Amino acid sequence: MTSDEKVILSQHPCFNHKVSRWFTRLHLPVATCCNIRCRYCSREYDCVNENRPGVASRPLPPRHVLKSVYNILSQDERIRVIGVAGPGEPLASNETIDALKRVHERYPHIIKCVSTNGLMLEDSIDQLESVGVKTITVTVNAVDPIIGSKIYSAVFYNNKPYQGIAGAKLLLNKQLAGIREARKRGMLVKVNTVLIPGINHHHLNQVAIAVKEAGAFIMNLVPFFPQAEFTLLPATSDGVLDGAKHELEPIIRQTKQNYQCFC
Ligand code: SF4
Ligand code: SF4
C-alpha cells in the first residue's frame, strides 16, 4: 500500500468504516445530466436512488461552490472528503471538473471523490487527476451484457445512442477500462453494485471477480428499492444483502456500513 493510500484510508469514511466515527464527507450537487438510463432510476431521486447526506436535488452552480464549502467546513471540522455524486452523472457534466478544480485550488489537502456510472471514466481520467481526485466509485451492476441489457435501457456515447446488448457491452468495457486506468493513476476504486432480486442477484460473484481483477479495492452492495421501470420487482431484504456480502467477502473486501452511503 502506498503512503497516499494509507492517508486516504485513515480519513475516508466510505473506504474505511472504522474512521466513519470521526470523519465525514460533503457532497456538491453540481452534476445534473446523465448519459445512461438505468431502469431502476427515477430522476425524481438522486443518482443510484440514494439519499446521501449533503446531496440536494437542487443543483449548485460551480461559481457558488467555494462559498458553500467554506460555510460548511467552518461549521463541521470532521469533513475530510469532498465528493460529487449527483444528482445526475458527475462525468456527464462539465460542472463537476469545474467545481472540483475550484475546491482543489483552495483546499488541496481535502480528499476529492467522484461517484460515476463509469461510461466516461477512462476518457475523463486526466482531468480527474489534474483536480486532485484520489478516490472513485463506479457502479457496476453486471458483467454479462445480457444481464446488463435488462438493467440499462440506453447508453449515450459520443452523441450516439446504444441500446440492448450493444449498450450494456459498451458500458461494461468502459467501466472496466476506467477502473484499470484509475488504479494506474494511484486512485482507490470502490465499486457499487445494486443487488436487484431476479435480475443480477445470482451474478454477483462474476461482478466481484471482474472488478477485483480490474483493480477495485472494495465493493459496496446497494439494496434495491422498487421504482421506475422496476416497480414490480421485490426490494432487497437485509437478509439477502447480508448473505451476499458474506459470500463475496472472500473475493473482494465488502463495505461494512449499510447506512445512507449507497454511493
Ligand atoms: Fe439515474 Fe445515476 Fe443511472 Fe443516471 S447513472 S440513470 S442518474 S441511477
Ligand atoms: Fe461521496 Fe460516494 Fe465519495 Fe463517499 S464514495 S464521498 S458517498 S462520492
Image: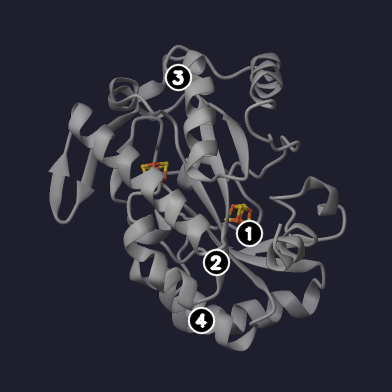
Is mark 1 in CB contact (under 8 Å) with mark 2? no
Q: Nearer the viewer, mark 2 or mark 3?
A: 3
Q: CA distance from mark 4 to mark 2?
A: 10 Å
Name the amino acid, label 1: Gly
Q: CA distance from mark 2 to mark 3?
A: 31 Å
Q: CA distance from mark 4 to mark 1?
A: 15 Å
Label at residue 226: none
Residue 84: x and y in percent read: 52, 62
Name the amino acid, label 2: Leu
SS class, disc 1: loop
Q: Mark 4 = which residue?
A: 64
Q: CA distance from mark 3 to mark 4?
A: 40 Å
Q: Mark 1 = which residue?
A: 54
Q: Quadrant of residue 42?
A: top left
Is mark 2 in CB contact (under 8 Å) with mark 3? no
Report whether 118 appears left or right of 146. right
In the rendered structure, which disc, 4 or 2, sits on the residue that comes first in sequence? 2
Q: Mark 2 = which residue?
A: 28
Does label 4 point to a residue whose CB lies under 8 Å from ligand 2? Answer: no
